[in-house]
């Protein structure tokens, strides 16, 4: 298992404990960030924006 896969699995395990497992899109976003394809700031903004919007529409 690569370091990237290990990190994603650890993040997913933490999220599952909160009953919020990562979806494939989230895992891809994290992978892109860890591989340097997108910046951490952009990744964080995307995730916060996604979940903020969803929480207000429920």
Image (cartoon, rainbow, N blue to C red):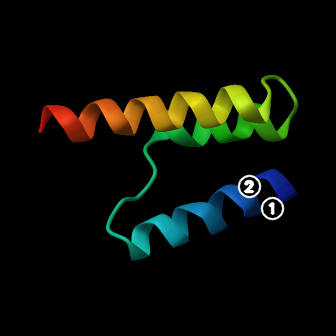
Q: Say what secondary structure mark 1 lies in.
A: loop
**Which element carries disc 2, helix, strand or loop?**
helix
Q: Quadrant of the C terminus?
A: top left
- Which residue is identified by label 2? 5
- Taking the spot 86% from the left edge, 35% from the top edge, the residue there is 35
Asked if residue 2 can be seen in this view, the reply is: no
Q: From where the camera sits, is residue 47 visible?
A: yes
Above or below, 46 against 19 in this view is: above
Residue 55 image offset from top left, x and y in percent: 24, 41
Q: Which of the pair 21/57 is nearer the observer? A: 57
Dot 1: few (<14), some (14–19), or many (≥20) neighbours within 10 Å? few
Q: Quadrant of residue 6?
A: bottom right
**Residue 53 coordinates in the image, percent (x, y):** 30, 30
Residue 39 pos. (x, y %): 80, 28
Query: 39 or 52, which is in the foreground?
Result: 52
- Residue depth check, mark 1 versus mark 2: number of the one nearer the observer: 2
Mark identifier at residue 1: 1
Using a 10 Å C-alpha cutoff, classify the residue at mark 2 as few (fewer than 14 neighbours), some (14 to 19) or many (20 or more): some
Q: Is residue 44 left or right of residue 7?
A: left
Q: Are marks 1 and 2 in contact (CB under 8 Å)?
A: yes
Between 50 and 12, the one lying in front of the other is 50
Q: Quadrant of residue 30?
A: top right
């Amino acid at each position: 298992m690569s370091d990237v896969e290990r990190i994603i699995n650890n993040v997913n395990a933490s999220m599952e404990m909160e009953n919020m497992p990562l979806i494939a899109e989230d895992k891809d976003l994290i992978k892109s960030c860890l591989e340097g394809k997108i910046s951490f700031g952009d990744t964080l903004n995307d995730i916060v924006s996604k979940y903020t919007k969803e929480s207000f529409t429920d």
